[in-house]
Image (cartoon, helix red, strand yellow):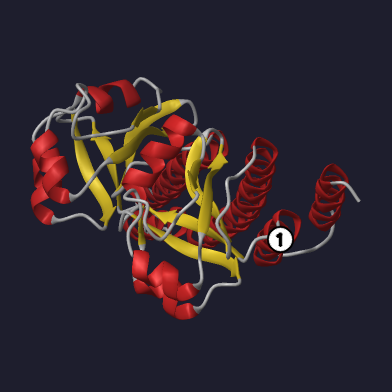
Amino acid sequence: MTRETDYFKTFCKISKAFGTTATKNELLKLIVESAVDSLEGKAACLFLADERQGIFVPTAQTGLSDNYLHANPLQAKGIMASLEKEGYLAFPDATSDPRLENHSAKKAEGIASLLTVPVTVNDRTIGVLSLYTGTRREFKADEIEFLRALAEQGGIAIEHNRLLRRMQKNAMLFLELASNINSTLDIQKVLSNLTENICDTLGMKGALIRLMDEDTGSLKLMASHGLSSEFLEKGAITTTETAARALKGETIVISDATTDKRIQFKDAMKKEGIVSMIVTPVLARDKVIGVMRLYSGVQREFPSDLMVMVEALAHQGGLAIQNASMYLKLQEDKKSLEEDIWSHRSWF
């Protein structure tokens, strides 16, 4: 059997697994095992980046001991920069190459050579796939391309799983919000639950909702979660550019709040630990009545389906406010009508 035939059979097996009910962990395990079998390696491991800690975390592996995996975590920053520049990293002698650390641990594990390729999702590196060999080896072009293709399959599996989980979380979030809206007319409670649930479900550091006070023309804080009192008071000083644009119906995404020219209080953002953010309008029917802000503690991309979700949630918050206002108005009208009827009865 030629190596090309072996590669083809491997991808047929992985494609078949994608068409079944295999879990993400099962698919990733299949990918690392396929790397070892097809490339005749000693071991393989797929690491995912932990953005908060700046390290790579082993997610699926075969052939490596727990002692080796947990001895010293891979530092993400330097590796990702090199991979984005070169497309792969090959270390024929992993026990002495100055670009690598922990030479003694590699020697004790029986590792001779190492090949590492990026795992990407939507052109963004989210991890690495590494192949380890027990004998010294110069990696060929077709071996590098095969491992890159396997890493791409790993990225697809991870993204597919994330989409499914996000859909499930979104559905539960909408269900809970609808339940809150139907169970109480306490707008403060509904909006507070909304900001808390958004942070928990979407992995945000903090969230807040401000509504327009028509008497003063300012934005009044109605609900928040995960943010300090000092930060909330700072935001109440003035209407920012992003808020002004949101009040016109626009949703704004800030990738880095500590450097973006549109952000007025960069020092406050940095002190609060905020990096990325979303500002979106709160609508009641077709009228903008406020803004909702979501804050992330790490720099992140916001996919289109998440943005649709955020805008829909802000709209649901606006509907809750509108429904409660209509109910209170009806109650006031009913009371006025009853008082008017009783006052007319006194005439007879």
Give the mark count. 1
> Image check: 173 left or right of 192?
right
Asked whether 299 or 185 is in front, the reply is 299
> Image check: 150 left or right of 98?
right
User: Which residue occupies 49% across, 31% down?
Assistant: 285
> Image check: 337 left or right of 273?
right
Determine whether 302 is above or below 230 in the image: above
Q: Position of residue 145 (x, y in %)?
A: 66, 38
Q: Position of residue 238 (x, y in %)?
A: 11, 30
Q: What residue sits right under mark 1 in the picture?
A: 27
User: Which residue occupies 40% across, 74% down?
Assistant: 70
> Image check: 194 left or right of 257?
right
Q: Position of residue 288 (x, y in %)?
A: 38, 28
Asked whether 84 or 340 is in front, the reply is 84
Residue 96, by quadrant, is: bottom left
Is residue 301 at all visible to an observer of this figure?
Answer: no
Is residue 60 at all visible to an observer of this figure?
Answer: yes
Determine whether 309 is above or below 132 in the image: above
Determine whether 115 is above or below 41 in the image: above
Asked whether 58 or 326 is in front, the reply is 58
User: Which residue occupies 45% across, 49% down?
Assistant: 327
The amino acid type found where label 1 is placed reads: Leu
- In the image as oriented, which residue stretches furthest toward the right? 1
Q: Position of residue 144 (x, y in %)?
A: 62, 41
Asked whether 303 or 125 is in front, the reply is 125
Q: Residues within 10 Å of mark 1 (few under 14, many from 20)?
A: many
Q: SS of the residue at dot 1?
A: helix
